[in-house]
Amino acid sequence: MKRKPFGGEAPLDLGDLHYAFVHSGRAALRLLLASGLGRKKLLIPDFLCGVIIDVLKEGKTPFSTYAVNADLSVQWPMVAKQSFDVLYVINYFGQQTKVPAGIIKGKGLIVDDVFAPRINTLPVKGSWAVFNSLRKVTALAEGAGVISTMKLNTAGIKNPLAEFADLKYSAKQLKADYLHKAKGSETGFINKFRQAEHLLDTDRSIHLPSAVTIGLLPGIIADLPTEQAIRRRQYDILDKALGRWSIKIRPAYYSFYVLSIDRRDEVRALLAKQGIFLPAHWPLPEGSGLSNELYARVLPVPLDSRYSIAEIRRVALAIKESICRIQR
């Protein structure tokens, strides 16, 4: 029996997988398109972030859409009847999408897992890719991981988009100073956030994350179990108070508690007057021709360890009262 060597460099078997780490979710999608998928016809959901359509149009990638139901599920028999090369699915708010094997037999699969702080390989055969977006679900200003069974064209990845990252981290520090030390003003950090987002929106390149992001990442990953335990408790509190309006999902990672309500934007406006600012996932993409009632109904409530249990209960009560006031 051959004796194995002891010591030296640790082996690492990547198998047939390819990995990359870029500055944003949209950059991850651009990387996949640049790696050969841009020449394929994609089938995308009709409820998504408008940036996805922007990136596809930018790359002149052909696509058509399939319907997402009010509960964020998919009518797979309808998908099976459509013509496409690559199926694009979104793990909405951390819930893992289970794609029937017959749907993607002989085709490609992209899983948009932007609500996950870490990504894993997919339990499917064939050609697939998965990516996330750390700035969606952590305090990091940027960062997106990519895993793919196809070779990634990483040659075009540029140095960090330094100005974007610097502005974003500067804005985050200003916000921390304002919240915890009563220094500065809301206007200061809000303006910097807007400047940073403008830079991100106008830059169509694929970049490496900044040194700050790389330095912070190990700590973020190490804290995930504790962070998720806190978010799970917050989720349960919100579910007890607001369950009648919720979309029933089973997230693998807790990022938001998701409501579906009538007159959503009126409720958001009423909450904003109380200092509670809830995002809209997502605004209906202009000029897209899409029509799904979810664009006007979905109201996600962020989960995060920076919020105390008392704050979560206060927010839950405010949301409940606002919904009842607007809808009565």
Image (spheres, rainbow, N blue to C red):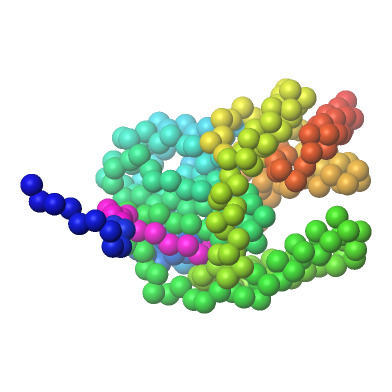
Report whether residue 269 is seen.
no
Check if residue 56 falls in the magenta segment. Answer: no
Identify which residue is drawn at 74% across, 69% down. Answer: 170
| Quadrant the C terminus occupies | top right
- Of the pair 227 and 97, the residue shown nearer to us: 227
The answer to whether residue 72 is above or below residue 6 is above
Q: Position of residue 252 (x, y in %)?
A: 53, 36
Check if residue 16 falls in the magenta segment. Answer: yes
Q: Is residue 38 left or right of residue 8?
A: right
- Of the pair 102 and 219, the residue shown nearer to us: 219
Q: Position of residue 212 (x, y in %)?
A: 61, 68
Residue 179 placement: quadrant: bottom right
The stretch of residues the image draws in magenta is: 12-27
Report whether residue 156 is seen.
yes
Identify which residue is drawn at 64% across, 52% down. Answer: 138
Q: Is residue 56 left or right of residue 326?
A: left
